Amino acid sequence: MRSATRRGAEVALLFTGFIASTYGFGMYLFPAMVESIRVELPFSYGTMGTISGLVQTGFMVCALLAGFLTVRFGAMPMILASIGVCAVALGGWPLRRTWSS
C-alpha cells in the first residue's frame, strides 16, 4: 500500500512538472520575447498588452473548462491531453520562421 501511494505521488509530481514547464513557456516567456517580436512585427505596446490580456483570459477560461472536463473524462486523460497539446505547441515552435516568410 505504501509503495502505491509513493508511486502515485511520483506520477503526480512528474505530470505537475510537465504542465508547469509548458505553462511557464506559454505564459511567462512572452513578455521576455516582446522586443524581438516587435522587431519582426510592428506591434505597439498597447497591442502587445492586449495580446497578453487575451492569453491570460484564455488561460482562465480553459482552467474553468478543465474542471468540468476532468469530472467528465477523469484526471489522467486530462493530464495526458494537456501534456500532448503543450508538446505539439512547443514542437511547432521551430516552424514559426516558415510561416512568417
Image: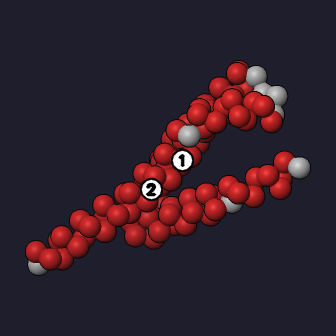
Label 2 SS: helix
Q: Is residue 70 above or below residue 62?
A: below
Give amino acid for label 2: Ile
Q: Amino acid at mark 1?
A: Phe
The image quadrant of residue 18 is: bottom left
Relative placement, left or right, of 57 versus 7 is right
32 or 86, which lies in front?
A: 32
Residue occupying image coordinates x 56% and y 46% = 26
Image position, residue 87 (x, y; %): 57, 63
Where is residue 81 shown, x and y percent of the image?
A: 52, 66
Identified at 10% across, 74% down, the residue is 2
Distance from label 2 to label 1 (Cα)?
Answer: 10 Å
**Residue 61 in sight:** no
Q: What residue sits 69% from the left and 60% below the top?
A: 92
For the residues carrying marks 2 and 1, which lies nearer the camera in this image? 1
Q: Examine the rendered structure and indicate whether residue 38 appears above or below residue 12.
A: above
The image shows residue 85, relative to residue 97, as above or below, that is: below
Report the front residue among 10 and 37.
37
Give how far across and how far down residue 9 sits, in percent: 23, 65
Question: How many C-alpha atoms fall within 10 Å of the one at disc 1: few (<14), some, or many (≥20)?
Answer: few
The quadrant of the image that shows the N terminus is bottom left
**Residue toward you, 3 or 75:** 3
Q: What residue is shown at x 78% (from left), y 27% (from top)?
A: 43
Could you tell me if residue 94 is visible in this image? yes
Where residue 98 sits, quadrant-wise, is bottom right
| SS category of the residue bearing label 1 | helix
Q: On the image, numbered disc 1 is attached to which residue?
A: 25
Residue behind mark 2: 19
**Where's residue 67, x and y in %?**
43, 54
How dense is the environment of label 2, judged by Cα within 10 Å: few (below 14), some, or many (20 and up)? Answer: some
